[in-house]
Amino acid sequence: MAAERRHALQTLPLFTGLPAAVTAELKAASRRLFYAQGEVIFRQGEVGTVLHLIELGQVKLLVPVDSGVGLMIGIVGPGECLGVVDLLEGDDRPYTASALTDVETLAVPQSLYLEAVQAYPDALKWLLTTITWRLRRTNELAADMAHLDIAGRIAKALLQLAEACGDSTGGAVVIDVPVTQKDLAAMVGGSRESVNKALGWYEGLGALERRGRYLAILRPELLQRRITQRTHPAPHRPSSALRRSHSRPETGGPLAG
């Protein structure tokens, strides 16, 4: 792991197109930072001075909405970089980043990185491609809010979490980060109550299972099918078994938080 971290600048996409000598200079000017779970890395509106290259852990990104509750626009992990969008704009941080787990980042000075990529077209092309992808992701999030009901948005969020943070074991994909019901509500623009109801319904269908502090996706095709139904309302529990699952007390783990 230490060897992988030592070579992060040379191997990660952020430094695509930069000569080894330039990446070595950037590495010398960078510093490694550590954040405990729940700690804020930076807040929306702060002036950005460094790019945070995530080496270990998962980070959640939030923006405020009119209701006063933060909307989670993404979860990013190792190999991804925080601060790319405001790099070119020269503006304040557009979102708040906080540690979903314990996090380790390599803080690269923004001014030095921007100076470097401007001198190498391949590196600048990667930077522009990354910003374009981020904008498309934001547009997709807005489209989901407009066209998917709450159950569909929750299903899509669970599949995205499984893809980004999943660990395949025993025929299931376990989302191995401590995502709370509050986090899921922030991801889909809903309430904790609506998230709890949807999780209970999906669990009753056999699509997922709560395993202590984590969620296991058992039948992702059921979640995918729910997404394609789009604007249909979330079904009520049709059987006594599903009604019993809805009446269970909370486990006290992150999904009950």
Image: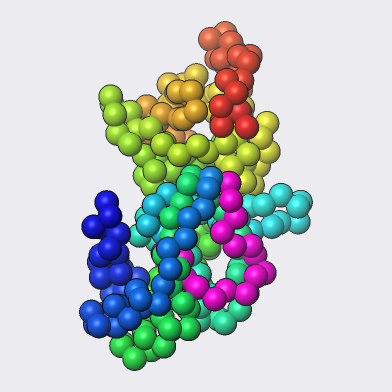
Q: Is 187 on the left-hand or right-hand side of 29?
A: right
Residue 222 colored in magenta in the image:
no
Judged from this view, the residue extending furthest toward the bottom is 119
Task: Out of 20 and 82, give the one closest to the viewer.
Answer: 20
Residue 47 colored in magenta in the image:
yes
Q: Position of residue 30 (x, y in %)?
A: 41, 72
Task: Out of 63 and 83, give the one closest to the viewer.
Answer: 83
Whether residue 181 appears in this view of the structure is: yes
Task: Out of 124 and 160, give the one closest to the viewer.
Answer: 124
Residue 125 sits in quarter: bottom left
Q: Is 90 on the left-hand or right-hand side of 78?
A: right
- Going 48% across and 78% down the picture, which residue do you hit? 110
How has the structure been colored for display? rainbow
- Going 57% across and 36% down the picture, which residue do you hit? 180
Q: Is 245 above or below relative to 162?
A: above
Residue interval drawn in magenta: 38-53
Q: Position of residue 94 (x, y in %)?
A: 61, 68
- Going 46% across and 30% down the picture, which residue do you hit? 214
Q: Is 185 on the left-hand or right-hand side of 56?
A: right
Whether residue 77 appears in this view of the structure is: no
Q: Position of residue 142 (x, y in %)?
A: 58, 58
